[in-house]
Image (cartoon, rainbow, N blue to C red):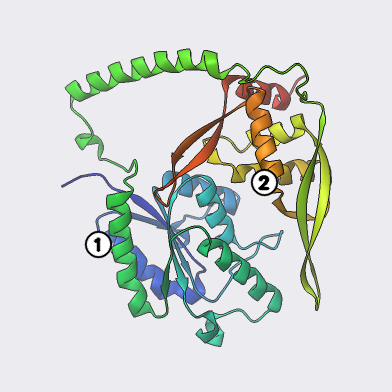
């Protein structure tokens, strides 16, 4: 039997789903793997969301349970549960989601009453249930076996890096072989870098980093008694502003959802208001192609959480160098 242990991040609202969370954590332990969740976090002075992201980074799978509450909300009006989910998807984690099949039937004590929060919860549910396989549940008794079966399926069909005890990790022979492979890998990466650092196209009239690109976005704001209002807007950003913001979140390969995060960050830097909720799909593709053409970004196809494939973005050596040049603090 494999001695590899997987770490699973259990995400949900807390007070209304205490028993369901306990069941999920017990299932993970029964399968001899490692659960991680908010109730297991130590007290820390580190910003809550930053700490959560670090824990998710260390996990192999992300398990989400949705009931009738949206959860604690940050300064931007987005729940920490939704922030966790967005980060897990953005970083390419295997997502295992369970959404309540009939939230209107949930007792009042375990559901939200504020129309604004209810609307936010509906939007979050729609996001989770779009473009991925999810399981629906109505009772705790129905949820527990679904979680167990889904975990077994994920471990078998989407194996991840996992953890292995140090005394079981490898023999001296295997370590020597691994070192040789790593050395060869370094050599190949160095050769590959010489190609990745070049522009993939050679245009005389390609826009430079200080040229302006008009990005089409959708903004949202909440108005009392009218709900959330959406508006089509445009924002002018230089390619440098877009790239520096994007490079700041590409500490590892991410899907192109990171482009929306980057545009939001670049917009905040110049004081753009109101809040950006989405970006025009064509403009997102243009940003990806432009930065790839400039030799700053590489795009590779890899497996997704659904078992299919998707494009993942990461910096080229030139991109990393340019990012450092623009962020370094000088005398």
- Which of 198 and 47 lies nearest the eye of the viewer? 198
Q: Position of 230 compared to 25: left or right? A: right
Q: Position of 29 compared to 212: left or right? A: left
211 up-or-down from 76: above or below = above
Q: Position of 229 compared to 243: left or right? A: right
Q: Is residue 26 visible?
A: no
Which element type, helix, strand or loop, lies under badge 1? helix
Q: Residue at x 34, y 44 (%)?
A: 160
Q: Residue at x 81, y 60 (%)?
A: 231
Which element type, helix, strand or loop, lies under badge 2? helix
Give the image location of residue 118, x and y in percent. Answer: 64, 75
- Which of 301 and 82 lies nearest the eye of the viewer? 301
Give the image location of residue 142, x and y in percent. Answer: 34, 77
The image quarter containing residue 236 is: top right
Q: Dot 2 corresponds to which residue?
A: 260
Q: Dot 1 corresponds to which residue?
A: 30
């Amino acid at each position: 039997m494999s001695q590899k242990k997987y770490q699973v991040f259990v995400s949900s609202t807390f007070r209304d789903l205490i028993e369901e969370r306990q069941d999920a954590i017990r299932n993970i332990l029964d399968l001899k793997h490692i659960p991680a969740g908010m109730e297991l976090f130590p007290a820390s002075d580190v910003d809550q969301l930053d700490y959560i992201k670090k824990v998710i980074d260390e996990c192999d799978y992300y398990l989400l349970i949705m009931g009738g509450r949206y959860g604690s909300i940050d300064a931007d009006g987005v729940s920490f549960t939704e922030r966790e989910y967005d980060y897990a998807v953005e970083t390419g984690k295997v997502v295992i989601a369970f959404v309540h099949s009939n939230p209107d039937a949930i007792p009042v004590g375990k559901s939200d009453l504020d129309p604004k929060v209810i609307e936010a919860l509906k939007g979050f549910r729609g996001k989770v249930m779009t473009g991925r396989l999810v399981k629906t549940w109505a009772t705790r008794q129905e949820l527990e076996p679904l979680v167990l079966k889904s975990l077994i399926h994920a471990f078998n069909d989407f194996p991840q890096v996992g953890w292995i005890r140090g005394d079981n990790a490898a023999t001296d022979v295997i370590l020597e072989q691994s070192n040789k492979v790593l050395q060869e890998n370094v050599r190949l990466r160095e050769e590959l870098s010489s190609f990745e650092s070049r522009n993939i196209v050679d245009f005389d009239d390609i826009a430079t980093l200080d040229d302006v690109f008009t990005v089409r976005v959708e903004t949202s704001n909440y108005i009392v008694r009218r709900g959330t209002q959406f508006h089509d807007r445009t924002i002018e950003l230089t390619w440098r502003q877009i790239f520096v913001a994007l490079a700041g979140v590409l500490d590892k390969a991410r899907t192109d959802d990171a482009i929306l995060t980057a545009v939001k960050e670049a917009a905040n830097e110049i004081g753009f208001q109101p809040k950006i909720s989405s970006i025009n799909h064509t403009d997102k593709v243009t940003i990806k192609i432009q930065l790839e053409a400039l030799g700053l970004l590489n795009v590779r196809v890899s497996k997704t959480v659904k078992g299919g494939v998707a494009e993942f973005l990461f910096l080229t050596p030139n991109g990393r160098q340019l990012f450092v040049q623009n962020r370094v603090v000088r005398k």
